[in-house]
Image: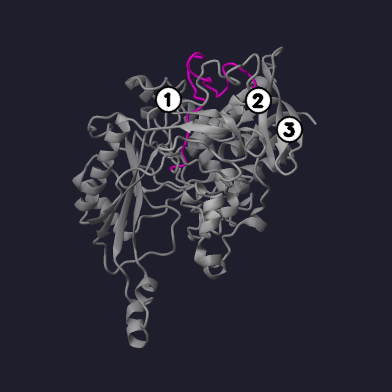
Amino acid sequence: MRFDAIVIGSGMSGGMAAKELCERGLKVLVIERGKMIDPARDYTDHLMPWELPNNNQVPEPEVAEHYPTQSQCYAFGPATKQYFARDSEQPVSTPEDRPFAWIRGDHLGGRSVLWGRQTYRLSDIDFEANAKDGHGVDWPIRYADLAPWYDHVERFIGVAGSKEGLPQLPDGEFLPPFELNDAERQLKAAVEARFPGRKVISGRTANLSVAQPHHTELGRTSCQARSICERGCRFGAMHSSLTSSLPAARRTGNLTVVTDSIVHSLVHDPKTGRVAAVKVIDAKTNVGKTYTATIFFLNASTLGTAQILLNSASEAHPRGLANGSDQVGRNIMDHLYGLATIAAFPGPEQSYYHGRRPTGLYIPRFRNVTEEAAGYVRGYGYQGGVSRAGWRQMALHPGVVGTELKSRARALGPWTAVVAGFGEVLPNPANRMTLHPTRTDKWGIPIPHIEYAIGPNERAMIKQIQEDGRAMLEAAGGKVIVQTSGEATPGLGIHEMGTARMGRDPRTSVLNAHNQAHDVPNLFITDGAAMASSGCQNPSLTYMALAARAADHAVRLLKEGAL
């Protein structure tokens, strides 16, 4: 069967591309390298703590053999390990002294099942940054080009947040926010009084604070405030491809999905200059198969997309498909991550909160916006929260019984405040992924080799992230008890992007303003690979907005006979 469109990858951007293409009447095939999972059967959010093995720990020998990298992800554990790729089966090469942790989903829906759900728009400050300070290449779009697609995606997925009127963090189409607790409001008041250019807001999150009719039509309902979202949400309260985008695509009758299908390469037709087919390998049988279509959307994730393009080299494209610019695989960016400051906090003694929100607080970027920076360009935001130990922690002490137990059980523990910086990393062509010259995976495909390092701009930024984090918590009366010494291993932010960037010039970029490959007109790339810069905001919303916009453009070109 020939399809109108093939989407490679079913995660955040692939799911959105499939939905938009199906809703416009195209017959769409989604190719997923991972296994099929069914939320009703495979999600683990119903399990009670005593039902999780090994005190909710994965045995160390199993981690060492199969998950040395994946286990570094905050979401990894006995309830979620089935979602992660095995490092033993899907290895990555890096220099010994410069590790890069590629966190990979291995199932339908990809990392959209595991994501942190923080949902922010880029602004014109971000879209204009490359042109203004000379790093990377100019984005071929501006905020006004993407704003209606941000609206479109936010309404569909459901984003809880507050409107703040900040130029560096545009407002969106929001559901009611998850409110800050009393201690966070206390922190907010102190920080905003001491630093007038800074704001503390509720983290904008793709969880349904109040489900709307178009959400419930897909079987989604409001958030239950359990904060175990990474296990998968049977209520559909968090957006993921499995409970939002793919069900919406499926109800059109235009969607076909194949799983356990490892994409080997895209087949380029030199006569037409276009992609003609996708070669895949069955993950279980190693049997090859080819699928054909008119339009191709490559959404295999930033590094997976680059791997496929580089492995699709041909006589017409000797450096890899769509790589006339030699930019495929280059300019990897992943946000500075793990830069946490933790303080004992003098929160209100007689206050607590209900449930476990799926979000915390957010401090939008202020450096190089309302305040100057100390010797670097771009900036950073903070995510965090203020929480307190509950009665269980106070009561669970060996030998405590009777009256003392009752007394402890009525007592609440101390408040603790956390702020963690997420900093922008500049595009750098030396930060790149290539195909390893000798090593292959179990399907015979060359494995990725990743070369990545931060530079002086990022190192200066890290210093001020830590200084500002301490200053804000101390200004609010906190006593800093822990501060990380440096950033986490690159990749653990799980915001890698940039390997097939958008741009105005085919000589220096891979994609045009509509995410269409300069060199291959029927190929569109709308995952993180397309990003020309990273901003400091969580990028998934931008990927989805780019995917929806590109799908609309591709269908219009198809109807005009241009594809």
* N-terminal label among 1 and 3: 3
Q: Main secondary structure of the magenta part?
A: loop
Badge number at residue 412:
none
In this view, the residue in front, 314 or 518, is 314
Q: Which mark is residue 430?
A: 1
The residue sitting at 20% across, 52% down in the picture is 474
Q: Which mark is residue 555?
A: 2
Nearer to us: label 1 or label 3: 1
Q: CA distance from mark 3 to mark 2?
A: 12 Å
Q: Earlier in the sequence, mark 1 or mark 2?
A: 1
User: Looking at the picture, which amino acid does disc 1 mark?
Assistant: Ala
Is label 1 in a helix, a strand or a loop?
A: loop
Residue range (magenta): 493-522
Secondary structure under the numbered disc 3 in the rendered image:
loop
Question: What residue is pinned by disc 3?
Answer: 27
Marker count (numbered): 3
Q: Is residue 514 left or right of residue 363?
A: right
Magenta-drawn stretch contains 509: yes
Give residue 513's position: percent from left, percent from top: 51, 21
Q: Percent x, y for residue 151?
A: 50, 36
Give the vertical position of 115 relative to 528 (above or below): below
Residue 238 placed where, x, y %? 53, 51
Considering depth in this image, is 461 or 64 the residue closer to the camera? 64
Label 3 Cα neighbours within 10 Å, binned few <14 / some 14-19 / many ≥20:
many
Mark 3 or mark 2, earlier in chain: 3
